[in-house]
Image: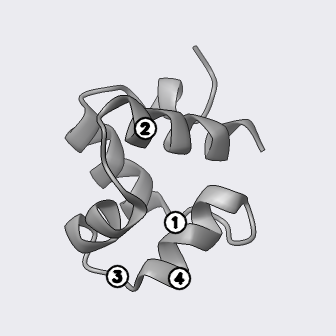
Amino acid sequence: MFVYRRVKDLREDHDLTQKQVAKLLNMQLTVYRRYEKGERELPLWVAIRLADYYQVTLDYLVGRS
């Protein structure tokens, strides 16, 4: 569950809405919301894209650092 909290925190730290991040990922808002809530498992390609966008490591994103 920690990974989902970091995804939300990073989005909020960058003053972005869920809609903006969903657009960046080219997905529906409802799908992205489910990732943030932990209702859907975060796919690797999404994690990589988010880590690149926020300029953090995958380890940080998934709570390993």
Q: Position of residue 29 (x, y in %)?
A: 43, 79
Q: Is residue 15 above or below residue 47?
A: above
- SS assignment at label 2: helix
Q: Amino acid at mark 2?
A: Glu
Q: Amino acid at mark 3?
A: Met
Q: Amino acid at mark 1?
A: Pro
**Residue receiving disc 3:** 27
Q: From mark 3 to mark 1, how far is it between C-alphas?
A: 12 Å
User: Which of the two discs, 4 and 1, labels the residue nearer the N terminus?
Assistant: 4
- SS assignment at label 1: loop
Of all residues shown, which one is farthest toward the top? 65
**Residue receiving disc 1:** 43
- SS assignment at label 4: helix
Q: From mark 3 to mark 2, how far is it between C-alphas?
A: 19 Å
Whether residues under marks 3 and 1 lie with C-beta atoms below 8 angstroms apart, the answer is no
Q: From mark 4 to mark 1, how far is it between C-alphas?
A: 15 Å
- Name the front one of labels 3 and 2: 2
- Name the front one of labels 4 and 1: 4
Q: Position of residue 41 (x, y in %)?
A: 66, 66
Q: Amino acid at mark 4?
A: Thr
Quadrant in the picture for the N terminus: top right
Q: Residue 30 bears which disc, if any?
A: 4
Q: Residue at x 50, y 24 (%)?
A: 60
Q: Residue at x 52, y 65 (%)?
A: 43
